[in-house]
Amino acid sequence: MFDSQQSGAGADADLSASVTVFVTTVGAPTFEACLAHLAAQDCRVTLRVIAHVAPMHAAFQRMLDDCTTPYFVQVDEDMLLEPHAVRTLVERIDAAGPQTAMVAGDLWDDHLRRCIIGVKIFRHATARHYPLAPLDHFEVDQVRRFEADGHTVIRAPAGLAPLAGQTLGRHGTQWTAASIYERYATLERRRRETPPRSDWFAVYGSEFLTRFQQRPTEENFFALMGVVAGTLASRQGPAQPKDYRTYGALPGLAALRAFLAAFDPPSD
């Protein structure tokens, strides 16, 4: 399902003929906040929402198929962008030249407490020739094909601290038990299956254990158990394509809910 509108309606610069912002949603609690941040952009853009399309590569393929502007920006519903974010991405890819297929900006991740590569802008004339494969790592696969054919991919340096003017927003500000468990199961499995690209995540097993010991909350519990689940799942071969419809039945999730509930104090 697609909705179409213009965002940043009160802004001075009108980029609506140049860039489409696609927002993917599967009903996360940050969706409305994500849209509010897009409405506050300092430029006008074409905004389209891709709702409840799965698996994930199928949702992202919609962007390649349905974009009608020279550029498109890929925004997940858990991204809260700064007002200058979309304009900055357009300026970066314009300045990079026609051989540049994609520019990725960094976001501050609230839960990881560091910056990550997050929001991305694509040159549609290039990207549309690189359909997304039905893989868990479909984005990495597409970038590899870009670069193999001589196209440029530019990634902002994602360090431990945000940089004023460079870091383009926040990521991961609200979680459910299932979403945080899935996230870290996926990241740990990828770290083990595709080194060294994901080696940065290696420190988080011990980090999440420390957080849980200090504050034994539900969120900290499922973050830690996600890392454990990803470690175990890595023995089963390549991961299947991500599909939000399976998150409620993730291996181990129901048992972990019951385990945690067994330690809840009785209510009065």
Image (cartoon, rainbow, N blue to C red):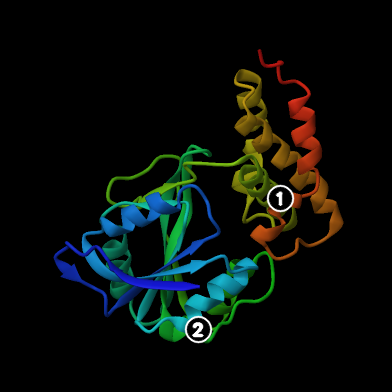
Image height of 44 relative to 108, above or below? below
Q: Is residue 170 left or right of residue 245?
A: left
Residue 28 location, x and y as percent? Answer: 52, 51
Indicate which disc residue 61 carries.
Answer: none
Residue 253 location, x and y as percent? Answer: 76, 42
Furthest residue to the left?
12
Residue 74 location, x and y as percent? Answer: 45, 66
Task: Report the amino acid beneath label 1.
Answer: Gly
Image marks 2 and 1: residues in contact by CB distance under 8 Å: no
The quadrant where residue 20 appears? bottom left
Image height of 173 relative to 217, above or below? below
Viewer-closest of 19 and 250: 250
Image height of 33 relative to 67, above or below? above
Indicate which disc residue 65 carries.
Answer: 2
Image height of 119 relative to 138, above or below? above
Q: Is residue 114 visible?
A: yes
Q: Helix or strand or loop: what does disc 1 sit on? A: helix
Q: Earlier in the sequence, mark 2 or mark 1?
A: 2
Indicate which disc residue 248 carries.
Answer: 1
Q: Is residue 10 left or right of residue 254?
A: left
Q: Is residue 157 visible?
A: no
How many labels sit on residues?
2
